[in-house]
Image: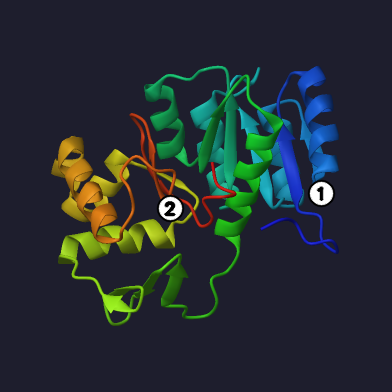
């Protein structure tokens, strides 16, 4: 879903590199976003306290506040979606950022098209599902949370209770990266957070039952070494 013509989603861009901010401000403006800038963590927190944006783009390498500390302070102010931009692409840093409150992670250097696609995906997630919404449809799949029922092309799909809980979590947190540890902790408890192979088998079975090829870029996408993401629209998602 692209930004509406009568509303330009607002972004707070937090990065200490002036040249990158200029480039991003230009490209994001062209894509239909309204951009505010902050060169440090403290300035960013002040901007958020003054007016919460629709999205935050955050560089982890700020001069005044460590990245994860900045995320935790931001989360005390708002639940606004946060996309991390960083030169650090190792799994440990990605996981730490996501667990600290980030919603997505993009490693520098990156493509402008991918950045915009991820931002639009985060916007979709942040939009209200509707009061008491319990029914969802994606592709040939219909999910009824109230009745714990799943249909594929109008025919019932038999899921185990844990498979349905996994599907429910992914749908309700659409377009957001969920780490292995988060999913395992929520569904199996804190003692299971290291059993990633266990989760992989459940995810494989769920995708198979919903008719999705394991290696395809469909609705259920794997973030290698980090976790999984349910993409509302695979043609737009990344």
Residue 154 is marked as: none
Query: Dot 2: within a 10 Å radius of its alpha carbon, few (fewer than 14), some, or many (20 or more) residues?
Result: many
Mark with earlier residue (1, 2): 1
Give SS at disc 1: loop
Q: Residue at x 70, y 48 (%)?
A: 49
Q: Residue at x 48, y 20 (%)?
A: 89
Q: Report the quarter where the C terminus lies.
A: top right
Q: How is the image coloured?
A: rainbow
Q: Residue at x 67, y 47 (%)?
A: 55
Q: Nearer the viewer, residue 211 or 110?
A: 211
> How much space separates mark 1 and mark 2, taking CA atoms?
25 Å
Query: Dot 1: within a 10 Å radius of its alpha carbon, few (fewer than 14), some, or many (20 or more) residues?
Result: some
Q: Report the quarter where the N terminus lies.
A: bottom right
Residue position for label 1: 32
Q: Position of residue 84 (x, y in %)?
A: 57, 32
Residue position for label 2: 219
Q: Nearer the viewer, mark 1 or mark 2?
A: 2
Residue 185 appearing in the image:
no
In the image, residue 134 sits, relative to residue 170, either above or below, namely below
Q: Position of residue 126 (x, y in %)?
A: 58, 58
Q: In the image, is 23 to the left or to the right of 162?
A: right
Give SS at disc 2: loop
């Amino acid at each position: 879903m692209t930004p509406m013509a009568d509303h330009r989603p607002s972004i707070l861009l937090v990065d200490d590199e002036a040249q990158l901010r200029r480039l991003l401000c230009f490209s994001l403006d062209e894509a239909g976003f309204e951009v505010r800038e902050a060169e440090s963590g403290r300035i960013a927190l002040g901007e958020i306290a003054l007016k919460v944006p629709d999205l935050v783009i955050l560089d982890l390498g700020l001069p005044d506040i460590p990245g994860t500390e900045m995320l935790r302070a931001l989360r005390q102010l708002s639940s606004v979606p946060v996309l991390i931009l960083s030169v650090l692409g190792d799994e440990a840093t990605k996981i730490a950022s996501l667990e600290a409150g980030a919603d997505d992670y993009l490693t520098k250097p990156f493509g402008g098209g991918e950045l915009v696609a991820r931002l639009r995906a985060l916007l979709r997630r942040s939009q209200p599902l509707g009061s008491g919404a319990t029914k969802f449809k994606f592709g040939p799949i219909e999910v009824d949370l109230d009745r714990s029922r799943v249909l594929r092309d109008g025919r019932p799909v038999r899921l185990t209770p844990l498979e349905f809980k996994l599907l429910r979590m992914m749908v309700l947190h659409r377009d957001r990266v969920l780490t292995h540890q988060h999913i395992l902790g929520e569904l199996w408890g804190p003692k299971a957070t290291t059993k990633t192979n266990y989760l992989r088998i459940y995810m494989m079975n769920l995708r198979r039952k919903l008719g999705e090829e394991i290696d395809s870029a469909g609705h259920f996408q794997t973030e290698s070494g980090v976790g999984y993401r349910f993409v509302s629209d695979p043609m737009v998602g990344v």
